[in-house]
Image (tube, rainbow, N blue to C red):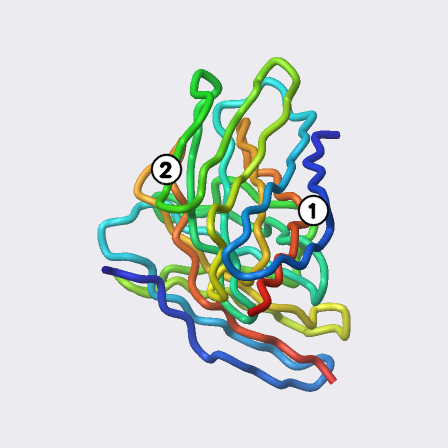
Amino acid sequence: KNQVEQSPQSLIILEGKNCTLQCNYTVSPFSNLRWYKQDTGRGPVSLTIMTFSENTKSNGRYTATLDADTKQSSLHITASQLSDSASYICVVEDYKLSFGAGTTVTVRA
Amino acid sequence: EPEVTQTPSHQVTQMGQEVILRCVPISNHLYFYWYRQILGQKVEFLVSFYNNEISEKSEIFDDQFSVERPDGSNFTLKIRSTKLEDSAMYFCASSEKVWGHPLHFGNGTRLTVT
């Protein structure tokens, strides 16, 4: 069964600090990997989409990396802001989308 | 920026009742989806819809569920006889193409079955 595992489950960081979220997957073959941001009580919003041939993609202060050989991806948040408090979901696509359980990030002033 | 809209934002219903959740996808999108998220759990796929028919459905999407695109703009999810375990956030999503394009999600309908 294709799985997408994210770590940590949650983390707390101080405003202005950086953090990195991890995603390991067993989906194979896969066509792309996505990161979504989900604010509490809202729908997920796409941050990045990377194909298997891409190693990194940025969207403002969010930078996603992908290592298709080790089946790992990370999402790095630079200079965190209070508005970054949300759940970040890793999604892997083969012929369908497989969702991770998400990492809940809390940014404190 | 165009967005997916869902109504109602919150629906409370009694067990055994029928509910219809409504969605207006982005106008030039061709692929439509319903997902659900039980509180504290991961987003789960229910069904995808293209060219006026279901293209794929999950094992969650049993005979109690149906989808319809009654006109050129609305996309609905019907649950025929709700159960307590149907309580969840239901998200509609749409995309321009099926592969490699971001899903655009609505803000969901919170369904509470009592």
Label 2 crowd bin: few (<14), some (14–19), many (20+), radius 10 Å: some
Say which mark, if any, is on residue A3: none
Query: Residue A21 at what x, y percent from top left?
Result: 62, 42
Considering the image in quadrants, where does the N terminus of chain B appear?
bottom left
Q: Secondary structure at mark 1?
A: loop
In the image, what residue type sits under mark 2?
A: His
Q: Seen from this angle, which residue lies furthest top?
A: A69
Q: Please report contact status of discs 2 and 1: CB closer than 8 Å, yes or no.
A: no
Q: Is residue B82 left or right of residue B103?
A: right
Query: Residue B54 at what x, y percent from top left?
Result: 48, 46
Q: Quadrant of residue B25?
A: bottom left
Label 1 crowd bin: few (<14), some (14–19), many (20+), radius 10 Å: few
Q: Chain of mark 1?
A: B
Between disc 2 and disc 1, the foreground one is: 2
Q: Chain of mark 2?
A: B
**Disc 1 target residue:** B59
Does B59 sit above or below residue A58? below
Considering the image in quadrants, where does the C terminus of chain B appear?
bottom right
Q: CA distance from mark 2 to mark 1?
A: 24 Å
Does B61 sit above or below residue A56? below
**Disc 2 target residue:** B101
